[in-house]
Amino acid sequence: MVKVAVVGATGAVGREMLKTLSERNFPAKQVVALASEQSSGKQVSFGEEKLLTIQPLTHYDFHGTDIALFSAGSQRSKEFAPKAAAAGCYVVDNSSYFRMHQDVTLIVPEVNGNNLQSTQSKIIANPNCVAIPLVMVLKALESLASIERAVVSTYQSVSGKGRKAMDELFRQTKAVMVGDAIAKEEFPKQIAFNLFPHIDTFREDGITFEEWKVMEETQKMLGKPINLSVTCVRVPVFIGHSLSVNVVFKDEVSVKNAHSALKKMPGISVVDNPKEDLYATPIDCAGDDDVLVSRVRVDPSVPHGLNLWIVSDNLRKGAALNAVQIAEKLLSLVF
């Protein structure tokens, strides 16, 4: 049994981490909830009956803590993750700060979990919330034929920006319906009944940093370069990220074989019978641990092309669940 700390325990992902640890009966002798000094003394739920009292991260001694799940933002991870690692604690970091560091392993357990055996760093990075479902699908499909190119459009819910963003969508939706003025704090424009053709800030080349992260992280996890074009869109959905993906293969891949390969990948469920209105939506994936794949079909505009639709709960498989699965893998390989 190990001692686990959850850093950022009051946030949307931190709360989901605590919920997931409890649901999966993670073998912890003690779970500690850490957050800012402003939250110190408050309580958060751990399971249906237990409450944990928040301790301030700035005063916490990581000596004796075996695994820390970080979801408190890049600046907190930058400052405190190395301190935790130096104290002998394995860190699973949900921020983007360490993901592209050469000595830090970027893990989706179903795809490259065994890479934990050879990691030299005690800091393990949890990937971007759309890179996770994308790399799972691409890994399954590349077993059929080499992937020459993929074009990805994402439709990402506001929970990817945090609890305050979810509250803003709720308030704006209510304001629109009753004719009140729209207050904008978390987003630069109204998000209710609207969408934005970007997530994160723009680079000089016109690509956003979110799009760059998805492209770079996917290639790092696959262990090879791939021609990948990504457009990330923010949509007025509370939970659940969706992806429209076009894949071009070196050789022909049938829909039947694609279905078969996807079904063999742990953590993927194929929901694909449009004639019966069987396809996945963000509402369907909310609270679901699996990545849901629908609308697999031939792209008639290009040789050896397939189109498909993916949805995933960004708070669970896109963040908290994947982090807990990494911790579970560490238990089996290290402890």
Image: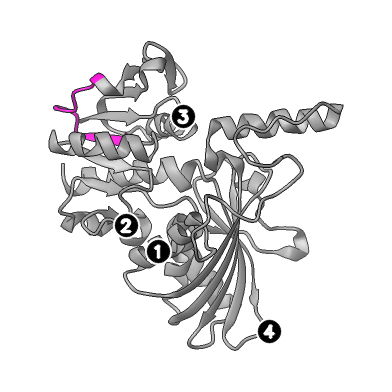
Sequence-wise, the earlier of marks 2 and 4 is: 2
The residue indicated by pointer 3 is 11
Instruction: Report the span colored magenta.
Output: 59-69
Q: CA distance from mark 2 to mark 4?
A: 36 Å
**Residue contact between numbered discs 2 and 4, judged by CB atoms under 8 Å:** no
Quadrant in which the N terminus is drawn: top left
Residue picked out by circle 1: 216
Q: From the image, which quarter does the C terminus lie in?
A: top left
The kind of secondary structure element at disc 3 is: loop
Q: Residue at x 69, y 43 (%)?
A: 236
Please report whichever mark, 1 or 3, sits nearer to the chain's N-terminal start: 3
Label 4: few (<14), some (14–19) or many (≥20) C-alpha neighbours in 10 Å: few
Q: Residue at x 29, y 40 (%)?
A: 78
Crowd around label 2: few <14 · some 14–19 · many ≥20 (10 Å): some
10 Å crowding of disc 3: few (<14), some (14-19), many (20+): some
The residue type indicated by label 2 comes to Met
Element carrying mark 2: loop
For the residue pair 141 and 167, the one nearer the viewer reads as 167
Q: Disc 2 marks which residue?
A: 100
> Is the Cβ of the residue at disc 1 closer than 8 Å to that at disc 3?
no
Outermost residue to the front: 204
Q: CA distance from mark 4 to mark 1?
A: 28 Å
For the residues bearing labels 1 and 2, Cβ distance under 8 angstroms: yes
Q: Which mark is residue 308?
A: none
